[in-house]
Amino acid sequence: PKLRRRDLLPQHQHLAVRRRAQAAMQRIHFLLPKTTGRSACGLLLRRGLHGDAVKRDCAGMEISFPSTLPHWIGGKRVFAKEGAPSTPKYYAATGEVLCHVPNGDADIVEAAVQAAEQGFKAWSAISGFERGKILSTAAKILYDNHPELARLEVLDTSKPLSESLIDQSGADCMHLFAGLASTECVNGKHIPVDANNFVYTRREPLGICLGIGAWNYPLQIACWKTAPALACGNSIIYKPSDLTPLTALRLGEILAEAGVPGGVFNVVHGARHTGGLLTAHAKVSKISLTGSVETGKAIMRAAADTLKPVTLELGGKSPLVVFDDAHMDNAVRA
């Protein structure tokens, strides 16, 4: 019999494609804040709440936010002290305040560094093969929860849901480095010299890495910085943009669910001051930034005092210039 297009895919893949297509056609509806009570500490997405919460209905899925987001330190949620400074997190499409983002102070930064130090000891002692299995599990969870994560990206960035559903590069990156964790890319190589001699190389993790992300691809950038750091046996403190902090916290939950020990992946919220405290910390061994040119210069200056290696991805790309005579609907769709 003639094969239909759907018959070319296994049944489970066909269903996944169909679900993604259906989700992409849905519109996003946001409800006004509702009054809720207080209950146990929690984070996002159908979990217990800490303090007053705002609920949103995002394409048919209820999402709950604590009034102030927690940090993720040592494998658990750490809330700022009452009255600590914070900044509002807006949903740009409507101007609504979804929640508030804490500005990590010196105590929070020190707690994150101590947790990362302990996490590094445990994680670096695991073989690359075992680390790869855990990261592979994390990649699977990211793939399985992609529709949920795409909706969080919409709330974070206000980009179209269809665009968020298409991009799975964060999970792809986790999957890639899961496979590399047990190879010579991470562990070094054995090189025969002659019949009686050989040399070998050994690659060792740096320690605590610091990742600082941008607002345009929050989850993807978090994975792009986290996956290679963890594959190589490092721990990481990740500071997302204070404009788009939501999915980094969800990534912390996913990594913990996959089996990553507490302290290996940490999230500290905050703006420039928090980034400065993290960058200057003597126990941070490596910095990776995606951000502006000016921020990159400041980080290079701060890292010079302790000779930290720095990776910088700076500046914007692919600008769209819209002139007065442009067709506005076409410009928006582009």
Image: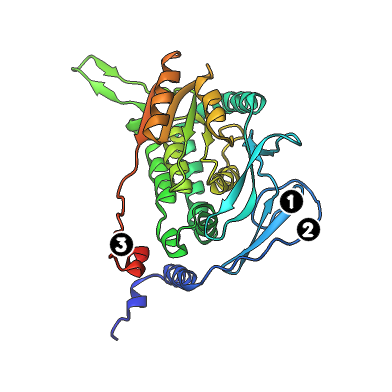
Camera-nearest label, 3 or 2: 3
- Please indicate, yes or no, whether residue 107 appears anywhere in the rendered image: yes
Q: Which mark is residue 305?
A: none
Q: CA distance from mark 3 to mark 2?
A: 46 Å
Quickly name the residue at label 2.
36
Chosen colour scheme: rainbow
Q: Few, some or many C-alpha atoms within 10 Å of disc 1 (few <14, some 14-19, many ≥20)? A: many
Q: Are marks 1 and 3 in contact (CB under 8 Å)?
A: no
Q: Position of residue 269 (x, y in %)?
A: 59, 37
Name the residue rendered at 53%, 46% in the picture: 244
What residue is at 70 percent from the left and 54 percent from the top?
47
Tell me the amino acid under the disc marked 3. Asp
Circle 3: element type: loop
Question: Pointer 1: what residue?
Answer: 49
Q: Residue furthest front?
A: 324
Relative to 246, 171 lies left or right: left
Question: At label 1, which amino acid type do we have?
Answer: Leu
